[in-house]
Image (cartoon, rainbow, N blue to C red):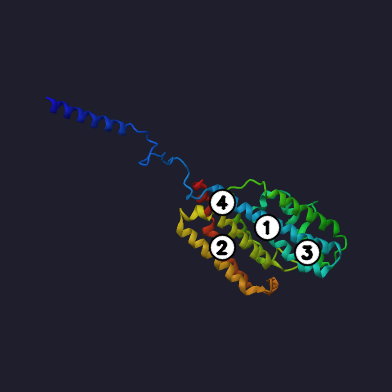
């Protein structure tokens, strides 16, 4: 009887231990420490907010550079230094052309800064870089341009402040990139943008670099969902930039007038071939949010 009672007691203890172990809090691991919360975000998963932050940093840096380069250009115009102003014109515009994927959200500032003479509505004012371009190259004078130049500087300073607060999302960034490439192919490749100075290749390269930066900011959202597409787009950007290299001259580019129709057609085809897969990115990044 004593042996039976001892065995029963031992069995009861085992049952009790097992029950206690089963009732242990689910938040404790084998070490006795609280386990990781499975609902916490995975730091390895790309987030839309990261893409927006990356791109905002890029446009803020270029807006700062835009102001830095526009000021000496404006000073040269105001001082009547035509040769100096001509030399500073294309470099001053370059940062603006890089952030052009989102220029549409600048409102009236975009046409005031970068509007073409042919796009000015009836009764409107032709202003900004291209108005000064016409004075410097076609009219060969800066007479009467001081107020216009000072307004340009004031406008780009507004852009510098604006890019810090504009609403951005990955789809807007991606659509802006492909929209800019389409604009190059549709109009800029004809030399209409800088029709007086023929510095169009500066603009085109800056546009492509800016579109690439916009795409690169959302690329982490794409590559995990469409790896082959990301690879195709990467190659497309490399191809367009490589095709522009033969036209480089010093720190800039040759005059657009040196390109033949075959040259511009070849560039246009490369840009179109890049814009097609890039147009698929917005839908992918929307699904990633």
The relative height of residue 269 versus residue 121 in the rendered view (above or below) is below
Distance between the alpha carbons at the discs numbered 4 and 2 = 25 Å
Q: Report if the CB atoms under discs 2 and 3 are less than 8 Å apart.
A: no
Query: Alpha-carbon distance for marks 3 and 4?
Result: 36 Å
Q: Is residue 164 above or below residue 252?
A: above
Whichever of callouts 3 and 1 sits on the residue coming sooner in the sequence is 1
Q: CA distance from mark 2 to mark 3?
A: 29 Å
Q: Secondary structure at mark 1?
A: helix
Mark yes or no: residue 86 visible.
yes
Q: Where in the figure is residue 244, as x and y percent of width and height?
A: 61, 70
**Image point 70% across, 48% down: which residue?**
162
First reached walking from the N terminus: tag 4 or tag 1: 4
Mark 3 lies on residue = 133
Question: Looking at this view, is 204 or 6 the one in front?
Answer: 6
135 relative position to 193: left or right:
right
Q: Residue at the location (38% across, 37% down)?
A: 28
The answer to whether mark 4 and mark 2 are in CB contact below 8 A is no
**What kind of element bears circle 2?**
helix
Query: Picture coordinates of residue 98 (x, y %)?
Result: 65, 59
**Disc nearest the viewer among 4 and 2:** 4
The residue beneath circle 2 is 272
Q: Residues within 10 Å of mark 3 (few under 14, many from 20)?
A: many
Residue bearing mark 4? 51
C-alpha span from label 4 to label 1: 17 Å
How many angstroms separate mark 1 from mark 2 (CA)? 26 Å
Residue 12 as seen in the image, left or right of residue 30: left
The label number, if any, that marks residue 62 in the structure image: 1
């Amino acid at each position: 009887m004593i042996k039976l009672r001892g065995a029963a007691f031992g069995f009861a203890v085992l049952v009790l231990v097992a029950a206690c172990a089963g009732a242990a809090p689910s938040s404790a691991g084998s070490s006795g420490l609280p386990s990781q919360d499975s609902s916490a975000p995975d730091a390895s998963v790309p987030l839309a907010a990261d893409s927006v932050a990356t791109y905002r940093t890029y446009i803020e840096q270029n807006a700062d550079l835009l102001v830095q380069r526009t000021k000496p250009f404006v000073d040269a115009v105001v001082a009547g230094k035509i040769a100096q102003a001509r030399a500073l014109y294309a470099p001053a515009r370059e940062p603006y052309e890089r952030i052009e994927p989102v220029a549409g959200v600048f409102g009236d500032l975009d046409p005031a800064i970068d509007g073409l003479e042919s796009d000015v509505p009836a009764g409107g004012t032709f202003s900004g870089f291209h108005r000064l371009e016409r004075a410097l190259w076609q009219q060969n004078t800066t007479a009467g341009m001081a107020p216009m130049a000072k307004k340009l500087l004031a406008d780009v300073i507004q852009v510098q402040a604006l890019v810090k607060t504009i609403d951005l999302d990955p789809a807007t960034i991606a659509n802006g990139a492909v929209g800019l490439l389409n604009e190059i192919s549709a109009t800029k490749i004809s030399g209409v943008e800088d029709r007086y100075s023929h510095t169009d290749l500066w603009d085109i390269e800056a546009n492509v670099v800016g579109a690439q930066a916009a795409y690169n900011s959302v690329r982490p959202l794409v590559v995990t969902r469409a790896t082959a597409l990301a690879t195709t787009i990467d190659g497309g950007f490399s191809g367009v930039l490589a095709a522009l290299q033969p036209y480089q001259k010093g720190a800039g580019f040759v005059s657009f007038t040196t390109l033949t129709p075959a040259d511009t057609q070849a560039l246009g085809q490369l840009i179109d071939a890049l814009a097609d897969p890039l147009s698929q990115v917005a839908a992918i990044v929307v699904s990633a949010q």
